[in-house]
Amino acid sequence: MGTGGRDPRDEKRNEKERGPQRGGLRGDIEASENGGGGFGENETGEKKKRKQKDGFPPRQKGGTGKTEEAFENETQNQEVRDRLRRQLKGRNMTQKEYLSELPKKTREALDLNDEERIAFIKKQKFIKHPKALKLFKKLEALMNEPKRDRMRSMLLVGDSNNGKSAMVKKFYEMNVYRDEEKMLFFEHVMLVQAPNKADLHDLYNKMFQFFVVPYRKDEPVSEREKKIRHYCDVNQVRMIIIDEIQGALIGSIAKQMEFMNGVKNLSNILKIPIVLVGTPKGVGLVSSDHQLKSRFVPTKIRKWEDDEDYLSLLYAIEMTLPLKKPSMIYENERLAREILELSDGLIGDIVTICELLAIEAVESGKEKIERKMLGEIDYVPAHDREGVIFADEI
């Protein structure tokens, strides 16, 4: 994104401060389990960007050779790291302290051989990071709202590979109730994937499949809605989450409106909130209709930035990696920044890079992540994959 009035010399100076960007790397994975606490957000940088976008050039900080934004961001990031060091138990850990901090599953994995440890690293996990905790809190509050004729709902959007599906899947799992002795099983959250086109009947088919019940495809919509209401009541469903909602953009405008009106009517009949999840394209499904726009409150999952949440994420990721020595990625400012730049702020890529670095640490015998390993892993940076058909050549 360009900034109005920026001096090219400032760009060169800032680029020099950031250090060279690494290329020729590769990977792909979804976000994943364990650790990580929530910390506050820093909005100053975002306000600065908006100000510059509106045509205000960055002012120079006297005698430093840096823009005011670069100077303040550097100061704030250092304060973030200092505060995080105080808050995280893992600060300046000895090897013994580091091993005691690792979650039980990660600690047990240390006894595996190298091949098994690498398999453990590659295994999909859910990382309980600050953004996830904030989303869970929002969804919990939405789910606990009293029933009314017009239920408030949510449109959750974010870029691909930024952890949306992983977070809503985890929230679904958190709201499954099992009692083996009484043979009770309730799913308080229904999680389904939207059809790959605007087809209301196909959406209802997926809901019947969720409940694992028989259904007839030729039933009228009204009958299907009655059955869905019955199964939702029996299973004590309190929220419906429809993932990959951008798929419903495929089809005529009439089909799209039929689909969204069906979703709205279902919320009215069940009197429970519905959460639509997808990429920013999904906003188009509700933006053209005032009633839908007022009911489905848009919530965006931002890309990761160099702040407390990001450093907390790095700490949480490290706690899932069975390495015999502490890497303390969050304390290595240059490494943390380069991981963020390579990943384009997407959690899927951040996790991938850290996992590839951990595998390199195991295979090399160093047992800890070092910055120079960024040049050794097989990963193509997110910004280099845009518009590229082939991510690698043999």
Image (spheres, grey):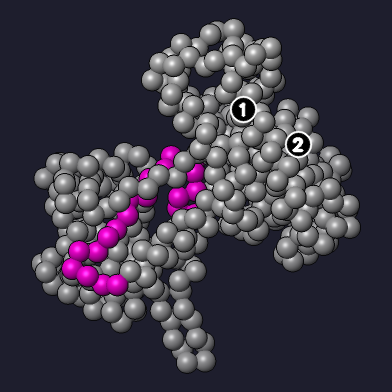
Between residues 244 and 272, which one lies in front from this camera angle?
272
Q: Is residue 63 left or right of residue 143?
A: right
Horizontal and vertical percent for residue 151?
A: 24, 64
Find disc 2 in the rendering and name its residue: 332
Separation of marks 1 and 2 at Cα, in angstroms = 19 Å
User: Which residue: 22% across, 70% down?
Assistant: 148
| Vertical arrangement, residue 312 with respect to residue 231, above or below | above
* Outermost residue to the bottom: 182
Between residues 255 and 346, which one lies in front from this camera angle?
346
Horizontal and vertical percent for residue 281?
A: 31, 39
Q: Mark 1 or mark 2, which has the lower sequence index?
A: 1
Q: Which quadrant of the figure contains the C terminus? A: top right
Residue at disc 1, secondary structure: helix
Residue type at mark 1: give it. Glu
Q: Is residue 194 left or right of residue 323?
A: left
Between residues 103 and 198, which one lies in front from this camera angle?
103
Write the start and end of the magenta stretch as one range. Answer: 146-167
Residue at disc 2, secondary structure: loop
Q: Quadrant of residue 306?
A: top right
Query: Is disc 1 surrounded by few (<14), some (14 to 19) or many (20+) residues within 10 Å?
Result: some
Horizontal and vertical percent for residue 320?
A: 70, 55
Find disc 1 in the rendering and name its residue: 72
User: Which residue: 66% across, 35% down?
Assistant: 77
User: Which residue: 50% across, 12% down?
Assistant: 6
Residues marked 1 and 2 touching at CB (< 8 Å): no
Residue type at mark 2: give it. Asn
Query: Is disc 2 surrounded by few (<14), some (14 to 19) or many (20+) residues within 10 Å?
Result: few
